[in-house]
Image (tube, helix red, strand yellow):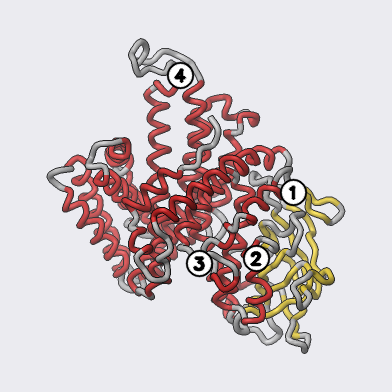
Amino acid sequence: MPFRAPVTDFTFLLEKVVGFEKVAQTEAFGDATPDTVEAILTELGRLTEEVWAPLQRSGDTDPAKLENGIVRTSKGYAEGFRALAEGGWLGLSAPEEFGGMALPGTLTAAMNDMLSASCLSLGLNPLLTQGQIEALEHHASPEIQAMYLPRLISGEWTGTMNLTEPQAGSDVGALRTRAEPKGDGTYAVTGQKIYISWGDHDFGGNVCHLVLARLPDAAPGTKGISLFMVPKYLPNEDGSLGDANTLRVVSLEHKMGLHGSPTAVMEYDGATGWLIGQEHKGMAAMFTMMNNARLGVGIQGIGAAEGAYQHALAFALDRKQGRTVLEGKPDATGAIIDHADVRRMLATMRADVFASRAIALSCAVAIDLAKASGSAEAKARAAVLTPIAKAFGTETGMRVAEMGVQIHGGMGFIEETGAAQYYRDVRVTAIYEGTNGIQSMDLVARKMMDGGEAVYALIEEMHAVAEAARGQYDTLAEPLWQAVETLREATEWMVSQSDLNERFAGSVPYLMGFARVLGGYFHLKAALAEDGDGPRSRLAGFYIARMLPEHVGLLAHATVGAEDLYSISVEDLSA
């Protein structure tokens, strides 16, 4: 079964579940009519099915290589990228004044989902460029914007982000890359960066690196970091490519997965760079790109889950083994999909893809509403949903991909089937753009600095929908209502802890329990949109009966505190 872009799922979610109509009703996004949205999703679906999906395996079997200082990408990747760029899709949500379409970011989220589902390694490239476009839009000088934005939006140039160094992983403040003023408005940037996704390629054009570095008078820690644009080639005034900058790819990382994505060790040797934003305020500018990427990485996980699910479903429909209770009945397939446990795994995969996708799109809708209206409420909602979307989306990607291997049985452990690739590719998404542990700490600390007000607003919304559905849809609404109350109690406990380490000790189970409840909420809304009778209603019944109960153990774990963790000594762990 070839890859099928889930266009109908996106249409249903946007129209019936996540409130996209509020975005389309704003003056800023009035062009996002149902007909326009349908046309965009359909065309992107065609692109991913026909052009990108055939590249999925080649990126794994024919990985990116560094040959004589030149990065050679996987067969077909350059053509796949050009098809995306020539369609104007890189500028789907970019500003019109620089050649973009200025459409809602929610549509870009749907696009990234489909790109990731069809070919995750290649999909990383446009995700980084999109983030750089947003960072430059908000923080760069008019001159930098005029030079870079039109070319990034057209796909003529591509973007990267350079944070990590060998001694500075999640602790960005420990970086040592330095920038010396050259006296002409530019800076000489010197240092080494690691894990730079798509640090170079052979697509042509320029590779534009946003690099964090320290000025000579910088304070220690993150408060002393500045951000610089350091391109591979120094652009001439007319935008043509001039001399090569003094930077190079030292090596490409040998990774567990994402072999088609060239992840580079970059060396800057007095490379010419331009300041983005204010001196010593680089983290504020980079956070614009990072927040964009956090939602984008969550969506990568969801897209990978979609691809893994479809791959496993095709195998389960084709593989014949053993007898089942359906044998001889009209709805029997004769394949392993008739086995109860295989059916359970497939339903689990599909239910979690739906739940995580709904969370991510709801986050994107909130971001769009905040941008269009300046609503503080929408901004706060987006802030709460971003770490949940990132962490739960990537956890879903890993779980679904792993289940896909299980459904294949022994064949899943054989590389030729392609099932293992989905797991290997998606595994890193739980690590980069802030590990999922960091996301959970952000949720229970910074995102609760308002006393939990934004979280409680989301809880009240879920409570109201569940309350209204009680009676007519009791089997779905009643368990969700109870789950929301349990989430409220766990949130009250979190807010009451003045020692943040008490919160951190249970932050991951809290985030995952929160996501489980949110998933039940969106499944209930889907069932209500079908009047409780249809495939999504049956999937909602499965999720609420079998998966929602996980929140009980997760939220109980979340509220234990830290004492028992530290009562286990290092010696105990080493015994």
Q: Which mark is residue 152?
A: 2
Q: Position of residue 376 (x, y in %)?
A: 35, 74
Mark 2 vs mark 4, foreground winner is 2
Residue 120 sits above or below residue 174 on the image: above
Residue shown at 22%/54% (left/top)? Answer: 465
- As helix, strand or loop, the secondary structure at mark 2 comes to helix
- As helix, strand or loop, the secondary structure at mark 1 comes to loop
Can residue 203 be seen from the camera position used here? yes
Q: Position of residue 169 (x, y in %)?
A: 62, 63
Residue shown at 72%/48% (left/top)? Answer: 254
Find out whether the residues at labels 4 and 1 contact each other: C-beta distance under 8 Å. Answer: no
Question: How far separated are the C-alphas under marks 2 and 4?
Answer: 48 Å
Q: Position of residue 434 (x, y in %)?
A: 53, 61
Residue 143 sits above or below residue 198 on the image: below
* Residue holding disc 3: 102
Three-letter residue code for mark 3: Ala
User: Mark 3: few, some, or many residues within 10 Å (few <14, many ≥20)?
Assistant: some
* Residue holding disc 4: 335
Q: Position of residue 371 (x, y in %)?
A: 43, 71
**First of labels 1, 2 by sequence position:** 1
Residue reaching furthest to the top:
328
* Residue holding disc 1: 73
**First of labels 1, 3 by sequence position:** 1
Find out whether the residues at labels 1 and 2 contact each other: C-beta distance under 8 Å. Answer: no
Residue reaching furthest to the bottom:
183
Question: How far separated are the C-alphas under marks 4 and 1?
Answer: 39 Å
Question: How far separated are the C-alphas under marks 3 and 4?
Answer: 47 Å
530 vs 39, nearest the viewer: 39
Three-letter residue code for mark 2: Leu
